[in-house]
Amino acid sequence: MTSRQTDRQTLRDRGICVVIPTYNNAGTIADVVRRTLAWCLDVIVVADGCTDDTLGILQGIEGITVVSYPKNAGKGTALKRGFRRALAMGFAYAITLDADGQHFPEDIPVLLQANRQHPGALVVGRRQGLDMARRSWGSKFANAFSNFWFAIQTGHRLADTQSGYRLYPLKKLRGLSLLTARYEAELELLVFAAWHGVELVSVPVGVFYPAPEERVSHFRPVRDFSRIFILNTLLCVLALVYGLPLALWRVSTTFLRTAYSLLFFLGFMLLVAPPCAMYHLLFVKDLERKRMGLHRLIYFFARLVTIWHGIPGVKLSVGNPHQEDFTRPAIIISNHQSHLDLMTMLMLSPKLVCLTKDWVWNNPLYGYIIRGAEFYLATEGMDVLLPKLQSLVDRGYSIVVYPEGTRSADCSVSHFYQGAFYLAKQLGIDILPIVSYGAGKVLPKKGKYLRKWPIRIEIDRRLSPEEMQAFGATARKQASGMRTYYMHRYNEIANRIEQDV
């Protein structure tokens, strides 16, 4: 499959279509639409009361959806109708580009990449080379004017607020029913998105400006500048009474969510865990019962935090299509994104043991519990670890290993090391893949605050030592093959969930 075919399929998998508003662009519309179809399978063209041959040309192009109406109502109305049609057709995102040939459909992969890296964000194409283009004084002033007032109204800076090349998260659009009808509607959509906490991402895109005598422009300087001035005046007032309170509320709830979760964690570890752990460590004589008691304490706390009590604003779900019950030992592998990964793993069964790092092993809050529960240091070396892990396996425990070794900063699946696969081979047990999504969005690697985001844990089918041979004969080849598998499975889950965030 070629890169273009892959991007086309990914756009569909992520629920992304293209919306092209047009008014009397008969000279360019066919070329723009056909070039767009080369990159996206789902194209909606809104014919905004066209009086030339535009509608007839569109009717001759197969594979597109045409929305038309007899009277010209302006770009804002065209966008509104295009977005509503896209939502009715089940799309989650819409890329918009102009019908006059100014934007390059070949830049669609740039917006797609931004959507994958920043799901739920409103992506704005930052037109390159504007300073070199032959533009009117009015066009240059309008862009600078818009950028300045946008920063005043939202506290965000964007280099090109007038660009119509964008990717909109349709389910997050606000103010759509109040949207102004014409040219200034795109600024309004940006402002309302910023007020409601939608992430704004700027990416570089190309732009084509034909000679002035060849351009088709519907911008009316006096009337449209007047409308923009009135809109900005209104938005400045709304920024004080609506936008600013929303921002303060959002900051406050994020802080309170994080503080509450931290206090809950500390309260349990300081007030509940010590007496329970000490009871098993001091008064339970049977060694195996003592260890299992500590495992059940860990399991109870993990489920309390992730399922029964939950993280405020975070919906966690578990997929277990193969009815895995963890009764048979396995090397459990998972991608690693966040400090929360350990909790989402240990909530699955009390019969799990993790290989940990030094700072976890020596943690003053819970280090004594995990040491008593036979969690071992990953840095001990295979010669030391193997006899200990063999003992755990013989007693029915599964070993959790994160093959990436460290948390991924951007939630992508990083390089897999071969240690987990070497252990599975030496111990003669299955590999059990578990795919984790969302924990890195809730609490990123360098993040300090908990965000609202869904977490999904998918328990895949366990693979026997014989089945692992399909990935390669050596541990190194198995690690490489399994990483490719994880990348595919993670993208499947992300494409499904990120249409609803």
Image (cartoon, rainbow, N blue to C red):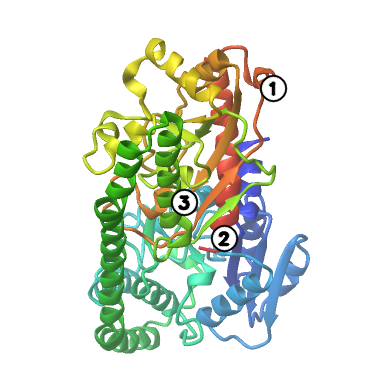
- 102, above or below 467, in the image: below
Q: Amino acid at mark 3?
A: Gly
Name which quarter of the figure residue 277 lies in: top left
How busy is the neighbourhood of tag 3: few (under 14 within 10 Å), some, or many (20 plus)?
A: many
Q: Position of residue 431 (x, y in %)?
A: 59, 27
**392 lies left or right of 23:** left
Q: Position of residue 435 (x, y in %)?
A: 54, 41
Nearer mark to the viewer, of 2 and 1: 1
Q: Which residue corresponds to mark 1? A: 467
Quadrant housing the N terminus = top right
Q: Which residue corresponds to mark 3? A: 438
Q: Position of residue 46 (x, y in %)?
A: 63, 74
User: Which numbered disc covers residue 319?
Assistant: none
Q: Which residue corresponds to mark 2? A: 499
Q: In 3D space, how far apart are the residues under numbered discs 3 and 2 (Cα atoms)?
A: 13 Å
How busy is the neighbourhood of tag 2: few (under 14 within 10 Å), some, or many (20 plus)?
A: many
Q: Amino acid at mark 2?
A: Gln
Ranked by sequence position, the earlier of labels 2 and 1 is 1
How busy is the neighbourhood of tag 1: few (under 14 within 10 Å), some, or many (20 plus)?
A: few
